[in-house]
Amino acid sequence: NEPDVKRVYNQDLTITNFATYLEKWRTYASAITNAVPGAKFAGPDAGSGNVYWTTNFAGALKDSGIISVVTEHYYAGGKGRGVEAMQGIDAMLSREWIKASQTLYNKMAKPVLWDGFPIQFTEANDHYSGGVHDASDTFAGALWALDFLHWWAAAGVRGVDFHNTQWVVNDVITREPGGRLAITPKGYGIKAFDLGGHGVIEPVALSNPDGINLTAYAVGDTGSIFVTLINKDHGADARGAAVSIVSEEIGPNAEVIFLNAPGGDVTAKTGVTLGGASITSDGPWLGKWTPLAPGKVGKCVLTVPAACAAIVKISKNEK
């Protein structure tokens, strides 16, 4: 785990850099495949941001036939210690974190995918070292998680495992007073992705002349198009977004589920709903899709309030 981190590989004095790590890795892999022919491996689980080990691992083993997935860690905001709550919230909802994902894609994911490997984040979260108190565990975390999952799915990453050290603030599962398990707002973002994230990634071109902090993602299956709209505008000057979804594939019928917090409060830790319902530890989620007013073929219109996400399910046009 994280072999690129010096405190890790210093535990084995024969490993001093990537080349000596790869030599040792091949020794272990060879011993395993000799005993279990056909065994497959994942790696290298490099630490957040150190793409050199990941890309070199993929390049060195692309013709080996024994790698099933290349793995990476990514904590978008780096270390959480010492970060103030609103600083953490503003960062999670910023355009800068989208740019950081694009940079990581260019440096790490693009060359690894080019080498023919799927990619998985076996550790990911907003910050490491437990997250940021009163930020990682708020509704801002839900909007960030939903955006993060869609962005990387659209970029071709196979999976994301949110790091879940027990009972820290960037967890998805936490404890209520009295010991009952509960879902943090981040869990709502994961569920929202589940609702609108199954199918084939569809291209999205976003026209946004007013500069609202809005992202959009689309996924299609045989009968429907799912469009996820995430309005990350927040604070005193936050704006709702009047959205028109335009495509020749759009039929006249659509329904929506909103992910929101009371009053659009990105600092909220409780009262978050998805489809008008909570996610509890002792019963099924009972959120509902709400029909939108019938539209024209080729166009769907709705408003996404500030600090809110919408998952829109649109029937495909039967040509």
Image (cartoon, rainbow, N blue to C red):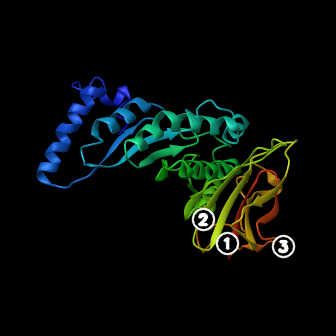
Q: What element carries label 3?
A: loop
Contact, CB < 8 Å: mark 3 with mark 1? no
Residue 178 in view (yes/no): no
Estimate how packed mark 3 is, as few (under 14), some (14 to 19) or many (20 or more) residues with alpha carbons within 10 Å: few
Residue 152 drawn above or below residue 225: above
Which of the two discs, 2 and 1, labels the residue nearer the N terminus?
A: 2
Q: In this figure, which residue is indicated by the disc labeled 3?
A: 293
Q: Residue at x 64, y 32 (%)?
A: 83
Residue at x-position 70% and y-position 50% = 205
In the image, which disc is placed on residue 282? none
Q: Can residue 104 be seen in this view?
A: yes
Which residue corresponds to mark 1?
Answer: 316
Looking at the image, residue 186 sits to the left or right of residue 86; the answer is left
Q: Nearer the viewer, residue 135 or 201?
A: 201
Position of 152 with respect to 218 (left or right) is: left
**Residue lying at the far right of the rendered structure:** 237
Disc 2: CA contacts within 10 A as few (<14), some (14-19) or many (>=20): many
Secondary element at tag 2? strand
Please name the amino acid that badge 2 sits on. Gly
Percent of width and height locating residue 238: 84, 45
| Residue that appears at 64% across and 71% down | 224
Q: In this view, does 161 lie above or below 223?
A: above
Q: Quadrant of the C terminus?
A: bottom right
Callout 3, which amino acid?
A: Ala
Q: Which element type, helix, strand or loop, lies under badge 1?
A: strand
The kind of residue on which mark 1 rests is Lys
Is mark 3 in CB contact (under 8 Å) with mark 2? no
Q: In which quarter of the image is residue 80?
A: top right
